[in-house]
Image (tube, grey):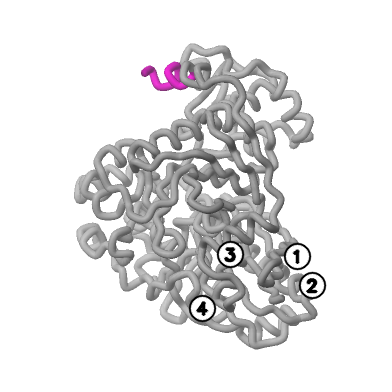
Amino acid sequence: MKSYAAVDLGASSGRVMVGRVGPESLDLTEAHRFPNRPVRVPEGLRWDILSLYGGVLDGLRAAGAHCGGRLDSVGIDSWAVDYGLLDADGALLGNPVHYRDTRTQGVAEKVWATVPAAELYAATGLQYAPFNTLYQLVAARSSAQLSYASRLLLIPDLLTYWLTGEVGTELTNASTTQLIDPRTRDWSYDVAARLGIDLELFAPLRRPGDPAGLLQHRVLDETGLTGPVPVTTVGSHDTASAVAAVPAVGNERFAYICTGTWSLAGLELEAPVLTEASRAANFTNELGLDGTVRYLRNIMGLWLLQECVREWGHPDLGELLLAAAGVPPLRSVVDAGDAAFLAPGRMPSRIADACRESGQPVPESPAEITRCILDSLALAHRRAIREAESLADHPVDVVHIVGGGTRNALLCQLTADACGLPVVAGPAEAAALGNVLVQARTHGLVGDRTSMRELLVRTQPLERYEPRGTVAAWQAAEARLTGR
């Protein structure tokens, strides 16, 4: 048995998990969980990166306490696209900008005037999202921080640098910047040159399984760990780690939905889909483990419910979901991928306004709004999976839901109903498990991706949901929403 610390940072919380792995065993324990609270300052919305780093150190200390002070490796994954800038001395130039900050409003149109949207997609395969790193860099072009920067590190790479003193840019996360060519798995030099983006800001590319340095002595002293402790490069985009932990079996033709603040719904492919039809449908080609492509669509996810729950004063979620289950289905639905829901604040009112504007019954109570959100997410899952099947010519027989949404039984059942396919839910901590398994693979404890998934099936609790009824009502709701 070996012990691995998985640092897994989400958009609303961070956690350090301890994975203990043997040839036939995989056990995951939460060592420490801490909030991730962005801060709005006069210049905009920022990540509190120092608080996050403090949480990581506290988590490594707690992980060591679980393992007698000795860890065999550490891996870090987080959300995508955001970054920190370092000066020539390696010091951080201010708190990283939050992807929900408004600085990228209107930037895409300026980019497309230089590199038309169709050319940009053909070169990078990335869906349009206003917060992609490319748009952030164009928005920051005239900023003092960028002018003084000598190095740009994506969030997991920044934390790795503070732990080890070594710099690198992990590939699965780099593929979300809109600056990577998914065919060559290298930088898209032409796109960067045309937009005036200096790729020398980025550290050399790393791939999952590559060494990322050793914990520095000051980190060992602060955490009480016994060195040397290597840091291993994992799929540092949390979705890459989560997809690596999809418990698919054999030659199963599967789709996946990584659920949490976002829903990432799509397929695992061997090659990108770079057609104009794919661009028009707003599918992305991000890179995954072992040369795979994560062909998926970003959907707003449980962010919609999280924001409502926050505004309602954090009622009991179990009671809220039980009440929502009793609300008539598909009474009102909204487009869960609409950028109108991206910003925080007033989410119940904004959902009600969207229903009113589309001529649907307006949900009023928390239960009605919750049912509207869950029906809308299930409908968005259905649309994404059906369109991905068609665009990639890749039939699907089962849907795997991983991540925090697996704990929401109503959402899992509604997704099965909407897709007309069985849903296998679990594991809930998929990103952390994928993180741990890549570390374990570097030590030879598990084999290829198939072996990793077989170990997950044998060791992790999974729940299966069979579709109920017919998809006719979902088809009608989809037609009502899309006008087709």
Classify mark 4: helix, strand or loop: strand
Q: Residue furthest front?
A: 250
Q: From the image, give the main secondary structure of the stretch colored magenta.
A: helix
Q: CA distance from mark 4 to mark 3?
A: 14 Å
Who's the residue at 74% across and 71% down the image?
Answer: 63
The answer for how far apart the CA atoms under marks 4 and 2 are is 23 Å
Q: Position of residue 457 (x, y in %)?
A: 64, 54
Q: For numbered disc 3, what is the local secondary structure?
A: helix
Q: Which mark is residue 212?
A: 4
Q: Is residue 480 magenta?
A: yes
| Residue 373 visible here | no
Residue 311: give x, y in percent of width and height: 68, 33
Q: CA distance from mark 3 to mark 2?
A: 18 Å
Check disc 2 and report its element: helix, strand or loop. Answer: helix
State which quarter of the image contains the C terminus.
top left
Distance between mark 1 and mark 2 Cα atoms? 7 Å
Mark 4: amino acid: Ala
Q: Which residues are magenta?
A: 477-484
Instruction: Give the amino acid at mark 1.
Output: Ala
How many angstroms separate mark 3 from mark 1 (CA)? 15 Å
Precedes in sequence: disc 3 or disc 2: 2
Determine crowd level at label 1: few under 14, some 14-19, many 20+ residues with C-alpha closer than 10 A: many
Instruction: Estimate the x, y position of residue 419 in percent, counting from the top left.
Output: 51, 30
Q: Any mark on residue 66, and which? A: 2
Residue under pointer 1: 31
Q: Residue at x 37, y 55 (%)?
A: 270
Q: Is residue 215 above or below residue 7?
A: below
- Disc 2 residue crowd, few under 14, some 14–19, many 20+, Cα 10 Å: some
Are discs 4 and 2 less than 8 Å apart at CB? no
